[in-house]
Structures are given as C-alpha cells and as structure tokens.
Amino acid sequence: MKQQYRIGLGYDIHRLIVGRELIIGGVRITHEKGLLGHSDADVLVHAIIDGLLGALALDDIGTLFPDTDPLYKDADSIILLKHVYEKIVENGYLINNIDSNIIAQSPKMMPYIPKMKEVLSTVLNISPNDISIKAKTKEKLDAVGEKRAIEANAVVMLVSK
C-alpha cells in the first residue's frame, strides 16, 4: 500500500505581560514578561498542535481544549501536545517532520532552541533532526516588534504507518 502524506499549518499569538512565566517549546525562558493565556500560552506548542490537528482535518486547539473549561486553566501545553500526538497515532499516522518559526522581538530564542527540539522530539517520538525551529523578529513592526506579543507558526507533515 502506498504511503499517504498529510500537511497541516498552525499559528498562534499571545500578549506579553508582567507576572507570568515565559514558556516556549516546553522550555522556561528567562524574561521579565510571560505570555497571557488560559493555559501556559506556549505559542510554539500551540502552533504545532494546530498543525497536527489540521493535517488530519480534526478540531482546532480551541475546540479541543476550550479556554472556557477550568480543566485547562494554566495547563502545561506539553501535556496537551501528548494528547494530540496520541490522536495522530490512533489515526494511523506518524510525524515526518515539523518546520516552525518563533517570532519575537525579544528575548533572543536561539540559546533555547536546542532544548526545545529535545523536549518536542521526546514527546512526538521523532528525531530532533526532524524538527526545525527558526527564530525571527518583526523588525520593530506591529505588536510583536513592539515587544507586546510573541507569535509562532508551524507546518507539519504526517506520513501513514
């Protein structure tokens, strides 16, 4: 039987505020602000989750883990990612690769990317070499460039087992 491939695209953005930890890619990042959200607001993991769900034309992250449900208040996004990965496997797919961007004017993401890849590869059962995480800025344009938000996007390719 011929292998089947599916592609999904994910995106997320959250505001930066004082009084929250900054967690991106499952890694705590030293910064004076963190991301505002119902869960831990991990923009990279949220973008990957939406990419995975989109690849199989399943519900999006907000439908699966609604911000109106107290169960997900301050939830660890890595746990949510594990749940979504189980859905991928249940549907007969494996992750081929992930290509992603973290868009932030500050802090600098490059020092944290190797650890992010390690965390994500462990959860998603793929090699860190199959995960691309690139750090970008907005050249001081819009909310991200003005250091008021951080965003991420991800493209995911699934392959049938």
Image (cartoon, rainbow, N blue to C red):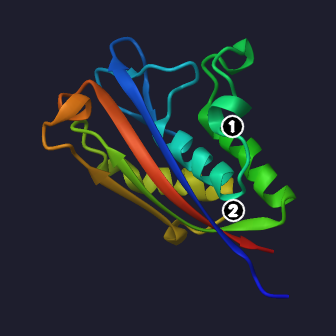
Q: Amino acid at mark 1?
A: Leu
Q: Which residue is rendered at x = 77% and y = 73% of the image?
A: 160
Tell me where residue 72 appears, x and y as whole percent. Answer: 68, 21
Query: Which label belongs to residue 61?
Result: none
Q: Residue furthest left?
A: 140
Q: Which residue is rendered at x = 31% and y = 28% of the image?
A: 149
Q: Amino acid at mark 2?
A: Asn
Q: Is residue 50 visible?
A: yes
Relative to 155, residue 11 above or below: above
Tell me where residue 130 appears, x and y as whole percent. Answer: 53, 70
Tell me where residue 38 appears, x and y as whole percent. Answer: 57, 18
Q: Which residue is rendered at x = 30% and y = 52% of the image?
A: 135
Left or right of 55: which side holds 31? left
SS for tag 1?
helix
Which residue is at the front of the view, 41 or 122? 41
* Quadrant holding the C terminus: bottom right
Q: Which residue is mark 1?
A: 80
Res 15 quadrant in image = top left
Question: Mark 2, mark 1: which one is toward the viewer?
Answer: 1
Tell me where residue 57 appears, x and y as whole percent. Answer: 71, 52
* Quadrant holding the N terminus: bottom right
Q: Residue furthest bottom?
A: 1
Query: Which label belongs to residue 125?
Result: 2
Left or right of 71: which side holds 96? left
